[in-house]
Every structure is written in C-alpha cells, then in structure tokens.
Image (cartoon, rainbow, N blue to C red):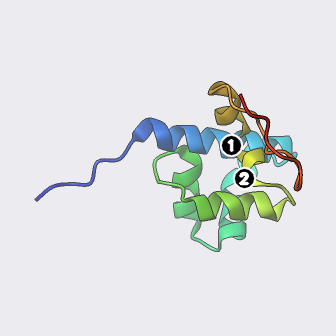
Amino acid sequence: MHEKKTDAPAKARAAQCVANFLSSKEVPTRKHSRTVEAILGISYSQAHRMVLGTDDWTLDELMKVASAFGSTLDDVLQPLLERRGQPSSAPPPGVPRKKS
C-alpha cells in the first residue's frame, strides 16, 4: 500500500501564516491553539497540531479563521503572497486587475 505523502514544509508555512495572523490580531501566542479550537470547533489536540504545523490546514479552515476576525484569506496568507512577489490582496470589487 502507498502512504499519502504530505508536504511538511507547506504545513509549516500555513501554520506560520496563521500564527502571524493571530499575533497581528493581538492573540497571545499561548492562546493560538485555544483560539483555533474555538473558531473551528475541533479538539484542542487537533488545533494544537495544526498550530504547530504537524497537521494540515484546509482552505475552508483558513477562511474560517480569517472570517472570525473580519478578515480575508489574503490577510492570513499575506506572508506567502508577498514572498512570491504577488500582491498581498486583490483589487477592490469593480476595479479591474492591471494587465502586465
């Protein structure tokens, strides 16, 4: 049988984005796991593994965390977007994207 291979660095990057986001919302580091537990309605153990970067994050989960603070997925993933040289947020509704 084949085991599902996961991208550990991707998990760690997602976890770091969430940690940065929660810290930017003035959530103390020691409360990150409890905050994720409450927002997602999952066990503390599961939330803690996600915050540590040992369990996967889904886009839906990332969006729920963002939404809980009145933010967008772009706000959570901003460090990744900036690292890749992409704009950190989409243009406002009704404003067309600039063409290169």
Q: Position of residue 79 (x, y in %)?
A: 70, 33
Judge whether 99 appears above or below 30 on screen.
above
Residue at 58% over, 44% down: 14
Q: Label 1 neighbourhood size at 10 Å, few (<14), some (14-19), many (20+)?
A: many
Residue behind mark 1: 77
Question: Residue 91's spot in the image, x, y percent?
Answer: 84, 45
The residue furthest bottom is 41
Query: Left or right: 18 with respect to 14?
Result: right
- Residue at 62 percent across and 27 percent down: it is 84
Is 25 located above or below residue 60 in the figure? above
**Residue 73 tag number:** 2
**Which residue is at the front of the view, 41 or 82?**
82
Q: How far apart are marks 1 and 2 (CA)?
A: 6 Å
To which quarter of the image does residue 77 belong? top right
- Left or right side of 45 for 68: right
Tags 1 and 2 touching, CB below 8 Å: yes
The residue lying toward the viewer, choosing from 95 and 71, is 95
Where residue 4 appears, as percent x and y from the top left, is: 26, 54
Q: Quadrant of the N terminus?
A: bottom left
* Disc number placed over residue 95 in the picture, else none: none
Q: Is residue 17 left or right of residue 11?
A: right
- Within 10 Å of disc 2 (Cα), the crowding (few <14, some 14-19, many 20+) is some
Quadrant of the rendering where the C terminus is positioned: top right
| 7 shown above or below 66 | above
Q: Is mark 1 on a helix, strand or loop?
A: loop
Which residue is painted at 87% across and 60% down in the image? 70
Residue 97 lies in quadrant: top right
Amino acid type at circle 1 is: Leu
Q: In percent of the image, x 54 and y 53: which residue is there?
A: 50
Residue 68: name its quadrant: bottom right
